[in-house]
Image: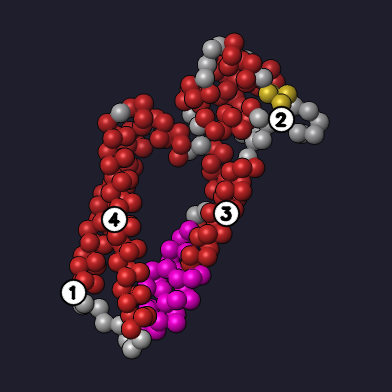
Amino acid sequence: MDKYKKMLVNRIRIMSLVICLSAVLILLNLFGVFKVASTDDFAKAFLAEFQSGLLLSLIIFFTAMIIRYNSVIKDDVRLRKQYNIENDERKKFIRQKAGFPITLISSMVMIFTGIVAGYFNTIVFFSLVACGVFQLNMVALVKLYYLKKF
Amino acid sequence: MKTKIKELRKLHKLSQSELAYAVGTTRQTITSIECEKYTASLVLAYKISKHFGLTIEEVFDFSEEDI
């Protein structure tokens, strides 16, 4: 369990770093540091708001995870339960069937690349984000199907 | 695959959560195994059998279809 405890502490550190980076990016976005190449006002506003929304949701999600992990680390029974949940063979099997983790990674890469590309070309931004979101939805549907099946 | 986990649990007065905690899995997995939706791996089958002090064959019913 000590190894798992250390892993959780490392995860907390990484998530804290992501929260800080996200907060900095939101602030830079608010002050208009990044300039969008497109002249279309809708695309400009959509890109900025999508980016802020995504980063804000990341901050909220990671903060909730940090709070959860901190409470889990202090309680040995909850730590064991959390370890069991993460290493449950049925869940691993379902995740594998649904295409984890490669589909999740590729979707996230698509969305983040789309955001960066959006500063140069909004069509690329919309295409990549739509692909990423579609892929995430498909993975979620497949996972739900297998959760029912097994 | 048919199992005697439910009967053994009742005999030992164990809940699904308690058994899951003891063998290092989740309640949902125990439910799935009991409902014959999911076939446990050899390691999990061994852990469950060992927990009840029985052999794998005594807990899990291997039919020709499963093999």
Q: Which residue is mark 4?
A: A59
Mark 4 chain: A
What is the crowding at mark 1: few (fewer than 14 residues within 10 Å), some, or many (at least 20)?
few
Residue toward you, A113 or A121: A121
Q: Foreground mark, 3 or 2?
A: 3
Q: Which residue is mark 1?
A: A31
Q: Which residue is mark 3?
A: A141
Q: Is residue B37 left or right of residue A45?
A: right
Which residue occupies 33% across, 27% down?
A76
Main secondary structure type of the part rendered in magenta? helix
Which of disc 1 and disc 4 is earlier in sequence? 1
Labelled pair 1, 3 in contact (Cβ < 8 Å): no
- Image location (x, y in percent) of residue A71: 28, 35
Measured Cα–Cα span from mark 3 to mark 4: 25 Å
Q: Which residues are magenta?
A: A103-131
Q: Which residue is mark 2?
A: B1
Q: Is residue B29 left or right of residue A127?
A: right
Residue A98 against residue A76 in the figure, above or below: below
Query: Can marks 3 and 4 be said to lie on one chain?
Result: yes
Q: Foreground mark, 2 or 1?
A: 1
User: Quick one: SS at disc 1?
Assistant: loop
Amino acid of disc 3: Leu
Labelled pair 3, 4 in contact (Cβ < 8 Å): no
**How is the protein colored in the picture?**
secondary structure
Which of disc 3 and disc 1 is earlier in sequence? 1
Measured Cα–Cα span from mark 4 to mark 1: 19 Å
Amino acid of disc 2: Met
Q: Foreground mark, 2 or 4?
A: 4
Amino acid of disc 4: Ile
Q: Is residue A127 magenta?
A: yes
